[in-house]
Image (tube, helix red, strand yellow):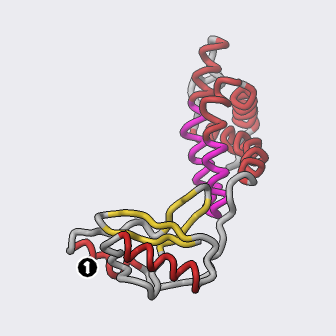
């Protein structure tokens, strides 16, 4: 968004104050950097949504703290226009992007799945009518994303009734398939396998 010279000056002052205030950084900016880094690592980062987050979460706090510290508002008129807030948010987000990229490196990148099976969601209504329900299609274990197994070794998508059936099926999955890891989970009175 294009700002006039006066608006650009106010936005720059607000952005510099917001960036250089430790309290704002540790309480507001750093958590947003971590959140956006997770989204970037997962491939779900949206700059437009991130800009809106900075505009609505960080910029108003910076404006209030500036007024409290200096006794006057950043803007000579006493109010910040949406254009000024957005220009300041763009500067702050540009500054945050280095931190977001660096932080994204410590989160696991989304890997394409090795195998694709029948989606559990197609039978979710049938399973739910029996009272079991279905667990989520993906789940995190030890920082790695696992997907719900829905192959040929059991009564999936309704899960296994006994732990013995599930353990036996998981042993077959480990022996005959090329998955890195298999986890067994209890959900809704049944047992489900997650694979990676």
In the picture of the structure, the residue carrying the numbered disc 1 is: 126
Does 192 sit left or right of 58 as displayed?
left
- Residue 126, quarter of the rendered image: bottom left
Residue at the top extreme of this rendering: 71
Residue 6 seen in this snapshot: no
Does 31 sit left or right of 150 as displayed?
right
Judging depth in this view, the residue of 77 and 174 nearest the camera is 174
Q: Residue 44's x, y, as percent?
A: 61, 62
Q: Quadrant of the C terminus?
A: bottom right
Judging depth in this view, the residue of 29 and 161 nearest the camera is 161
Which segment is the magenta one? 32-60
Residue drawn at x 71%, y 39% as measured from the top left? 92
Residue drawn at x 54%, y 59% as measured from the top left? 140
Judging depth in this view, the residue of 79 and 156 nearest the camera is 156
What main secondary structure does the magenta stretch of the protein show?
helix
Question: Tag count in the figure?
Answer: 1
Check residue 42 for magenta coloring.
Answer: yes
- Residue 167, quarter of the rendered image: bottom left
- Vertical side of 138 occupied by 27: above or below: above
Does 146 sit left or right of 8 as displayed?
left
Residue drawn at x 51%, y 67% as measured from the top left? 183
- Vertical side of 37 occupied by 58: above or below: above
Q: Residue 40's x, y, as percent?
A: 67, 57
Q: Residue 175's x, y, as percent?
A: 58, 82
- Vertical side of 185 occupied by 99: above or below: above
Q: SS of the residue at dot 1? A: helix
Check residue 131 for magenta coloring.
Answer: no
- Residue 133, quarter of the rendered image: bottom left
């Amino acid at each position: 968004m294009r700002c006039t010279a006066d608006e650009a000056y106010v936005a720059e002052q607000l952005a510099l104050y917001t960036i250089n205030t430790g309290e704002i950084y540790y309480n507001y900016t750093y958590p947003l950097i971590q959140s956006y880094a997770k989204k970037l690592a997962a491939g779900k980062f949206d700059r437009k949504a991130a800009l809106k987050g900075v505009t609505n979460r960080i910029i108003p706090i910076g404006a209030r703290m500036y007024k409290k510290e200096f006794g006057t508002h950043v803007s000579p008129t006493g109010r910040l226009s949406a254009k000024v807030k957005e220009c300041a948010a763009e500067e702050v987000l540009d500054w945050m992007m280095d931190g977001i990229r660096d932080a994204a490196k410590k989160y696991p990148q989304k890997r394409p799945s090795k195998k694709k099976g029948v989606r559990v969601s197609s039978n979710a209504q049938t399973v739910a009518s029996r009272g079991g329900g279905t667990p989520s299609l993906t789940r995190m274990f030890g920082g790695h994303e696992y997907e719900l197994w829905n192959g040929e070794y059991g009564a999936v998508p309704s899960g296994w009734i006994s732990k013995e059936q599930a353990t036996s099926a998981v042993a077959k999955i480990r022996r005959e398939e090329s998955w890195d890891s298999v986890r067994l989970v209890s959900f809704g009175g049944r047992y489900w396998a997650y694979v990676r």
